[in-house]
Amino acid sequence: MAKYSKEFKYSIMIKMMPPQNQSVSEIARETGLSEATLHQWRKQARTKGMAVPSGEQEVERWSTQDKFLIVMETALLSEVELAEYCRSKGLYVEQVQAWRDACMQANGGVAQQATRFQKDLREKDRAIKTLERELRRKEAALAETAALLVLRKKINAIWGDGEDA
């Protein structure tokens, strides 16, 4: 297994990143590296937070993970810095802003949905408690009625039906 320098790996990652967006197969043909090695390097770069698209030329077809990583990289940039970043990566500022908006809406939707689920859960818990209380009351009434019927049969057995008189 050959050991490659960090600089060499970084230069390969740069080829995978915007604006070049070269595919793994293209880089493998150019460099003679195996595609498996390049895929592994790209995976490692992604876990370190680098936006390394899968060689897709159309920016809108990038994975949501890559778009999110771009949003994270640009989150603290000023407008001027964002414009410069986008120029260097071959992106449009509007694309990054749209991705940022999508990320923010996705998180807001999850929070609202969680709140709604919690409210529904509380309401269902209240309904279950009410139904359980009603069931206990009805079971007690049924048990009392059954006891009275048994008592009536015993009284009739001891005293008779009263039809003989």
Image (cartoon, rainbow, N blue to C red):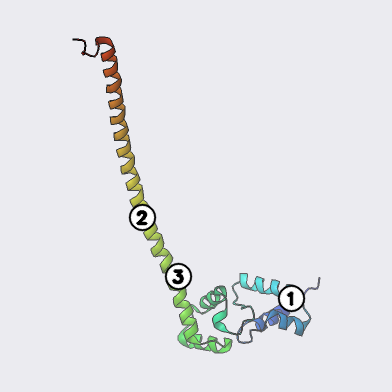
Which class describes the residues within 10 Å of circle 2: few (<14), some (14-19), or many (20+)? few
Q: Residues within 10 Å of mark 1 (few under 14, many from 20)?
A: some
Q: Nearer the viewer, residue 69 or 80?
A: 69
Q: Amino acid at mark 1?
A: Glu
Vertical order, 130 against 148 (above or below): below
Is label 1 in a helix, a strand or a loop? Answer: helix
Locate residue 26: give its quadrant.
bottom right
Q: CA distance from mark 1 to mark 2?
A: 50 Å
Which mark is drawn over residue 120? 2
Q: Is residue 25 left or right of residue 75?
A: right
The residue that disc 3 covers is 106
Mark whose residue sits in front, 3 or 2: 2
Mark 3 residue type: Ala
Residue located at (47% from left, 77% from top): 100
Query: What kind of residue is marked 2?
Result: Asp
Q: Earlier in the sequence, mark 1 or mark 3?
A: 1
Give the x, y percent position of residue 121: 38, 52
